[in-house]
Image (cartoon, rainbow, N blue to C red):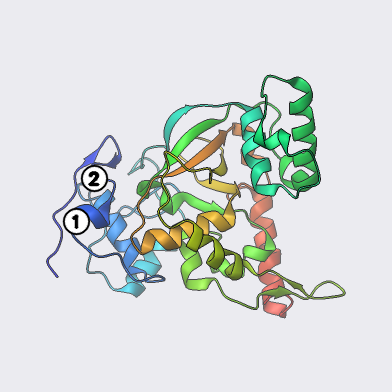
Amino acid sequence: MQRPAPRRVRAGRLAHPRPWATSGCSAPQIGSLAFYCRIRSLACANVASAVLCGSVRWHAVEVNLGDQEVLADCQRRRAPAGICSIAAMQIIGSTTRENLTLVWLKSEWDGTADRQLIDDPDLTDREQNKVRAALLRRYREPILKELPEEMSPVCVDIEEADLLKLYILPCFDWYLDTGETFRLVDTPAHLAAGREFLGWPSPYRFEHLTKVDAMARGLVGYEAGTTDEVLILIAEDRSGPYTIIDGTHRATALYRNYLTGTRMPWRGILVVNRAIAGCMWHIESPRARANMVQFKRFAELGVLR
């Protein structure tokens, strides 16, 4: 196969944000580590080599690197400061906490309250907003209580250049299905049927693969400009890394479809706040890292499998 011409990087972003369509190359097979190599060569074609890959750092590598070399490169977590930073996620507009709550509630809806709160919302009505916020807390209190009270969410386009900085919510049930990394790009190779936790009186089965299979079929033909399938993310700063706090199955399904040719960007709502550095859902927080040590112990004991 003819090697694609290097892509020019403009202001830290991809000049051509659709590598499969513009290069004439077919998408790598699902689970293939060749994907990482292709993305990095496109994003960093004009950057000197020896730049390590980290949560917000990328490494300029050659398209023909072997899978083992690419994997070793991907597993490095840090880079010397100031070498090569990919630009922050693309902001397309501002939004409100009330709209974030509405979008999130749509994906959690169980039909136990007035559907008009979803279908015909008035985001200027304080009473409606209070009811929606209370409903969302009923479903997602463990996540919401970790978020700062003051927030200025923004609408974003999630692009190829952001993929290596996207993380699944670091809960124990996603630990093995992400290859113990919680990185979205690691899900295709590790998502499996039969995952379960045996630490309770009865086994708790996760069924992530079943959900992703069903969602992937429904997300074929996804278009960011018209979709209602919006991901919600948090970050300490705009450059990431970004944790997906709502839409983990959707993001996994979207990524699977992307590897087989469905184009990006994806639509998201991003909350950025320095206080998120201490949030247990922020992938680089000390609390998240401590939890990952515990998850690893569960897996070693066979309690998580």
Spatial CA span between label 1 and label 2: 9 Å
* Mark 2 element type: loop
Picture residue at 31% right of the left edge, 56% below the top: 39
Q: Position of residue 8 (x, y in %)?
A: 19, 44
Q: Does residue 180 appear in this view? A: no
Q: Residues within 10 Å of mark 2 (few under 14, many from 20)?
A: some
* Image location of residue 98, percent across then percent down: 66, 28
The structure residue drawn at horizontal position 58% and vertical position 51%, both measured from the top left corner, is 247
As drawn, is 30 to the left or to the right of 178? left
- The reply to whether dot 1 and dot 2 touch (C-beta < 8 Å) is yes
What percent of the width, then of the height, locates residue 184?
Answer: 50, 58
Q: On the image, numbered disc 2 is attached to which residue?
A: 16
Q: Quadrant of residue 69?
A: bottom left
Residue at figure coordinates x 74%, y 46% from the top left: 140
Other-residue count near label 1 (Cα within 10 Å), few / some / many at <14 / 14–19 / ≥20: some
Q: Can you give x and y, in whole percent of width and height, for residue 36 in the image?
A: 35, 62
Q: Is residue 24 above or below residue 47?
A: below
**SS class, disc 1:** helix
Q: Quadrant of the N terminus?
A: bottom left
Say which amino acid is labelled 1. Answer: Ser
- Of 117 and 247, nearer the camera is 117
Instruction: Determine which quarter of the picture holds residue 157.
Output: top left
Q: Which mark is residue 90?
A: none
Q: Residue at x 53, y 53 (%)?
A: 167
